[in-house]
Image (tube, rainbow, N blue to C red):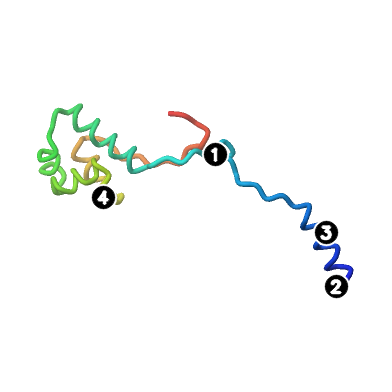
Amino acid sequence: MSEFQAYLQQALKKVEITKESKDDRIEDYDIFAEIAEMIIEARNEQGITQGQLAELTGVSQANISKFETGNSKPNILTLKKIADGLNKRLVIAFANGEEEE
């Protein structure tokens, strides 16, 4: 074994690999669950059913139901259609992970 290999082996013994704790990283969140809650809340505020929202958006009632239950993930174009149907503006932003809303 060369001197360098021996040095490297000794140096590597001093390296401690630890698992990153949950407190050290941005807390995971489910963006689609958050979107589902927003759709449900906005729809309920306006007092409309999934079927009525479907008529306003051109998105099927079945798909709206799937989005609200988390069984399907809407794309941005579909989210815009839903926002338009709810007379809302779709806003997408990156926020600091440490901020609470």
For marks 3 and 4 on the same chain, the one whose residue lies earlier in the sequence: 3
Q: Name the residue tied to disc 1.
A: 22
Labels 2, 1: front one = 2
The image quadrant that residue 45 belongs to is: top left
Residue 58 visible in the snapshot = no
Viewed as shown, does residue 85 lie left or right of 95?
left
Q: The C terminus is located in which quarter?
A: top left
Mark on residue 1?
2
Viewed as shown, does residue 21 lie left or right of 27?
right
Labels 2, 4: front one = 2
Q: CA distance from mark 2 to mark 4?
A: 57 Å
- The vertical placement of 11 against 65, above or below, is below
Q: Name the residue tied to disc 4.
A: 72
Labels 3, 1: front one = 3
Q: Amino acid at mark 1?
A: Lys
Q: CA distance from mark 1 to mark 4?
A: 27 Å
Q: Name the residue tied to disc 3.
A: 10
